[in-house]
Image (cartoon, rainbow, N blue to C red):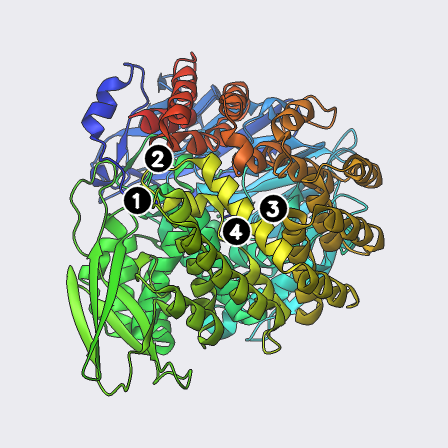
Amino acid sequence: MDIASRPSEPSTNPETADAAVPPHAPATIRREDYQQPAWLVPEVALDFALGLEATRVEARLSVARNPAGNGSPTLRLAGDGITAESVAVDGAPHGAWKMDGPDLLVDLPGEVHEVTIVTWTNPAANSQLMGLYASNGMLCTQCEAEGFRRITFHPDRPDVLSIYRVRMSGTKAQFPVLLSNGNCTARGEGADGTHWAEWYDPWPKPSYLFALVAGDLVANHDTFTTISGRTVDLNIWVRDGDQDRTHHAMQALKDSMKWDEEAFGREYDLDLFNIVAVSDFNMGAMENKGLNVFNTRYILADPDTATDMDYDGIEGVVAHEYFHNWSGNRVTCRDWFQLSLKEGFTVLRDQLFSQDMGSEAVKRIEDVRILRAAQFPEDSGPLAHPIRPDSYQEISNFYTATVYNKGAEVIRMMRTMVGPERFRKGTDLYFDRHDGEAATCEDFVKAIEDGAGADLGQFRRWYAQAGTPRVEARMDFAEGVATVTLTQTVPPTPGQPGKQPVVIPLRLALFDRASGANRGEELVVLREPSMQVSFAGFAERPVLSINRGFSAPIALDAGQATADLVFLAAHDDDPFARYEAMQQLVVQHLIGLVGGAMLCQAERDAGREAIGRALEAVIGDPALDDLMRGELMILPGETYLAEQLAVADPGVIHEEREGLKAWLGAQLRDQLIALHERASAVPYGLSAEARGARKIKTQALVYLAAGAPEVAADLAVQQYDAADNMTDRQGALMVLAGLDTPLREVKLAAFHQRYAGNALVIDKWFSLQAGSLHPRVVDHVKALSGHPDFTLTNPNRVRSLYMAFTAPHAFHAQGGEGYRMIADLIVALDPINPQTAARFVAPLGRWRRVEPMRSALMRAELERIAATPGLSKDTFEQVSKSLG
Ligand code: ARG
Ligand code: ZN
């Protein structure tokens, strides 16, 4: 998972999009074309002779004709970049196989057969990091979604479940540790310094959950006793020297195992749970049965090298992958269109877990911020798709914030409507009913409906329709009665010009202005295009607080007066609503400035001053804890601001937002300095108090950097020099990286020197510079791309330099240099790692929403990419949809 994403897009007709693509365009796979597999594979036996440059794979598949299939005598096995050295059927060499493109076809006369296939792969040459690949001298696999077919020929679809037996042998010196799914059943020595191991996984699983790891690794070992008293061995495997950085991940694993027993009644089902950390990985981590494989950034942490955010990321991702053991592995997906069945649900599960482990309020705010920054733009752009997509060319392109994060919000709404207890009855029924099966999103909704006793008929539209619904809320007040009128519209998205109204649960409260109290929260469910609800008995016009807790993933227009927002920012007892009022206060002000509204100076000043007073109150409010104070201090991001406008000028948004920040930093200079001083006195620790102190410390610097740069530079250097942890050090360096001070270079060099050789920290060094507010970021990024530490072959490093760069102003630099750099990157990276290359298309794909000058430049870069010969399916799909 990675790791954090939409207004009314002119509707794109898929017919015209298709007409524009050349004849060699990849085939479109459609959900409505689903057919049962013709052949099932009850058992798989794999034998690996491991070598970094040549690995031999012998696969023995027990195949059985599926009575529910189409009866075809032809067994079609998917392949990708592999050829068969030999094929045998029932033990006898078989000459009559043939290839159909990448697939291998074998005609089989009977109902059950054993098909044995030998293939070879070169893991060291596998720069895509899909299938079996080499990373730092070790071998590992990534099979989701369609990587298994790069190892051997197989149906490689999630509705074909098999019991796996794996044997592997290799040089003991090179691969002292040999791991696969399930339990190790035998191991021994071979000739010439080789050894071997056999693994058996009793749980039937789809091929995407297969994993193998071989390398020189050491384990942090621990145990967990399950609720029924079974002892489970836990290992986190890392390179020697990294053991001491695995303790937080281990604690997160044990906490997750316990939490899933209590919160969802799910017990672990093997005697062994292995996690391996690898430094070359396309995504966050992977839930292979009993053998999770992780990006090192979601395992390794200690105070000197990892920030508080890194710690939270580790806890969340370790939990996410562990929770997949039930939501994904025991109950898996019928086809890849159902991806949100496992991902949306598992994201919800990890969010609820993190809410319980730390601050519920802060976690909810962070999750909404991620949704708005990553999913809203996706839902309003050319790549918009429903959480259950209808078609794809390359499934890797659908591991999106929509499938993951909006998917989680949709399930969260079900929970909000039926309540936690009934929701649990629904999930119990789901696990019970579908255990061992490959299920659909419809199966999930039906189970919640039956288990919780709810009617989710119309609610299902959330699965089918793309686009962020917009809700307008207006309140009238007359004769003591407040009447709220709610109106919804779901915007058109590519391929979906017309939309139906959805079910929108809105938590709502009305506040009495005089007492600051409300009369209790109500859940109002909007189903029709529009509705009215009335509340009687108010002496004066109350203040409306709506979509509390962000109960629905919508764009809300509550048309609130500044005074009401100021009131809610100070008084709302729902922490999310309080945060939202602060955000909205700034959004309305800045959008008023950049959106062409002719504001006079007095109006500008009044808006700014209201924000200043609200921020001052936040800084000084003794009732707030510092973690929450830190959240309330964060200004809405530039992407979210741009989202509010049909067509935005990113340059103006940046200037106005920075201008506001500078004004606030100058106005509240003394308060911010005092805040920094107070927080600096709190010693390092992992308590909420100490973490909160670190968060506001850097927040204070961020405002001061804009409003009082000399003061900020001094304080940042102080903070950097005094830092005994990465949160403080990175925060200080981030601020310095944006300032024009000689100390910038000095501290960046010191940081690089201190952490030379620590890949995860060097990634931070790249990101801080690429994402900085410095006016010459473009030059910096260009220079950094030639730095000896930079490489296109490691996805973490590529993301650290270029993802950070696509976020801020520099990407939109006048003249289009930023766009050119990202397009150059895509063209260079596509042949090496198409999955990662395709991830960089979306920022350019926003061209329709950007002012005309920049828009033309962005579009031209997309066209240049599209004209590149030999483009991967991944990049082709994203670029052609972005242009379509
Ligand atoms: N199932 C993994 C997770 O979210 C993501 C793996 C996706 N990998 C990929 N190559 N598309 O936990
Ligand atoms: Zn997942």
Q: Nearer the viewer, mark 3 or mark 2?
A: 2
- Are the residues tagged 2 and 1 within 8 Å (C-beta)? yes
The residue wearing badge 4 is: 289
Q: Is residue 147 above or below residue 27?
A: below
| CA distance separating discs 3 and 2 | 36 Å
| CA distance separating discs 3 and 4 | 13 Å
The residue wearing badge 3 is: 294
The residue wearing badge 1 is: 7
Q: Quadrant of residue 93?
A: top left
In front of the other: 588 or 8 = 588
Residue located at (37% from left, 49% from top):
599
In front of the other: 485 or 47 = 485
Which of the marked residues, 3 or 1, is nearer the chain's N terminus? 1
Which of the marked residues, 4 or 2, is nearer the chain's N terminus? 4
Residue 849, numbered circle: 2
Q: Residues within 10 Å of mark 2 (few under 14, many from 20)?
A: many
Instruction: Indicate the position of residue 139 as horizontal and vertical percent values.
Output: 65, 34
Instruction: Indicate the position of residue 762 as horizontal and vertical percent values.
Output: 73, 38
The count of marks equals 4
- Are the residues tagged 3 and 2 within 8 Å (C-beta)? no
- Kindly state the secondary structure of the residue where label 2 is placed: helix
Residue located at (49% from left, 38% from top):
143
Which of the marked residues, 2 or 1, is nearer the chain's N terminus? 1
Which of the marked residues, 3 or 2, is nearer the chain's N terminus? 3
